[in-house]
Amino acid sequence: MATQQDLNKVIQVYIETKYGTDYNYVKDEAQAEALEALTKKKTIDRYDIRALEKLGYTIELVMSPKVSLNTIK
């Protein structure tokens, strides 16, 4: 069973493609705001992900909130 402290060490990220470029967005708003304050960007890149993993965070890829299983054909 995961504790609350363990859940804070997981950052859920989803990918959106715009004009052929993939962007990694943090799903949780509180985490996204904190990371934006640190990085001065709304998205995180591979260098940010590496740094977060070195700090003990786990990055979890999730489905974009804009997509649902009903919209996939």
Image (cartoon, rainbow, N blue to C red):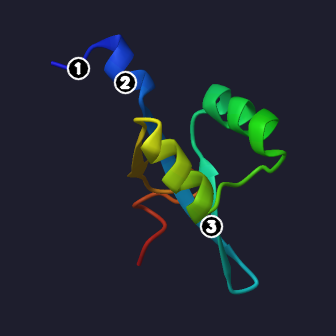
- Left or right side of 39 for 45: left
Toward the left, the furthest residue is 1
Task: Give the left or right position of residue 71, taking residue 35 as reference.
Answer: left
Residue depicted at x 80% and y 34%? 37
> Secondary structure under badge 1?
loop
Crowdedness of circle 3 by 10 Å Cα count: few (<14), some, many (20+)? few
Q: Estimate the spatial distance between the alpha carbons at disc 1 and disc 3, rounded to whole Å.
A: 29 Å
Query: From this viewpoint, which residue is outermost toward the bottom?
Result: 20
Crowd class of label 2 (few under 14; some 14 to 19; many from 20; radius 10 Å)? few
Find residue 64 and report its horizontal and vertical position in percent. Answer: 53, 56
Residue situated in front as seen by the camera: 9 or 1: 9
Query: Residue 9: x, y in percent?
Result: 41, 29
Q: Is residue 6 left or right of residue 41?
A: left
Specify the quadrant that holds the C terminus.
bottom left
Q: Earlier in the sequence, mark 2 or mark 3?
A: 2
Disc nearest the viewer among 2 and 3? 2
Please, what is the three-letter code of the amino acid marked with disc 2? Leu
Please identify, in this view, whether the residue under mark 1 or under mark 3 is nearer the observer: 1
Q: Looking at the image, which residue is at 66% across and 31% down?
A: 29
Query: Residue 7 has which mark?
Result: 2
Asked which secondary structure carries label 2, the reply is helix
**Image mark for residue 16:** 3
Q: Which mark is residue 2?
A: 1
**On-image quarter of the N terminus:** top left
Whether pointer 2 and pointer 1 mark residues with C-beta atoms closer than 8 Å, the reply is yes
Type of amino acid at the residue the image marks with label 3: Glu
Q: Residue 36 appears at what percent x and percent y?
A: 77, 40
Q: Secondary structure at mark 3?
A: strand
